[in-house]
Amino acid sequence: MRSRKIELVSRTIEKLLAARGWSSRLKEYRVLGIWDRCVGASIAAHAQPVMIRGKKLTVIVDSSAWMQQISLLRPEIMEKLNRSLGEEAVESIALKLGEMKSSGSGNEGRKIARRSLNAEERKRIEEYVQGIGDEDVRDRLKHLIEKDLASKKPSSSRN
């Protein structure tokens, strides 16, 4: 009985995300959330996933030396990501040389400044998630939506 309820909640969430065009964003957040753990601190300090489209993950690398190293580790990285995700979500990794977003040192430097959400946005998010009975799932989805909205506009923006 319990597993059936979990399936129903997951289907409901998938439908909700797909209806709002957020299902690909959820996959991105999942990959971004496990990247450091899967690749380790040394690689994470020099390579940052920026997007996943379909099953192709794009990663920005800060130097050609690290690009070569990560290129050799692609199969292992994909295997670790897919194992952590519990699905074959990543079939290829495209590496691009570039500047990683950073405002400090280490993993903390990878956080992007985000603006605060206004009352109307918070109310809209509450309306989106109100039908989800499982409190933990509802809170996680609410946090995901808040993060997505906050990241779309710089902190100096007002809406």
Image (spheres, helix red, strand yellow):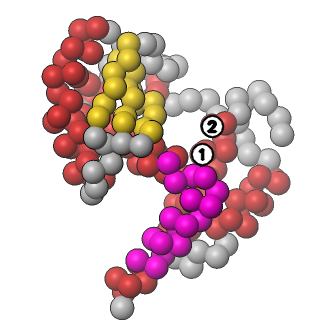
Secondary structure, magenta segment, majority class: helix
- Residue placed under numbered mark 1 in the picture: 147
Q: Is residue 116 visible?
A: yes
In the visual, does 21 lie left or right of 67?
right
Q: Which SS class for mark 1?
A: helix
Residue at image x 46%, y 24%? 109
Horizontal and vertical percent position of residue 13: 52, 67
Quarter of the figure that contains the C terminus? top right
Q: What residue is disc 2 on?
A: 151
For the residue marked with disc 1, what is the amino acid? Lys
Q: Answer whether residue 139 is visible to the viewer in this image.
A: no
Q: List x then y, in percent, for residue 63.
A: 32, 9
Q: Label 1 to label 2, Cα distance in Å?
A: 6 Å
The magenta stretch is: 7-24
Dots 1, 2 in contact, CB < 8 A = yes
Q: Position of residue 111 (x, y in %)?
A: 51, 31
Of the 4 image quadrants, the one containing the N terminus is bottom left
What x and y, as percent, mark residue 55? 36, 42
- Left or right position of 34 against 28: left
Residue at x 22% of width, y 22% of height: 70
Q: Residues within 10 Å of mark 2 (few under 14, many from 20)?
A: some
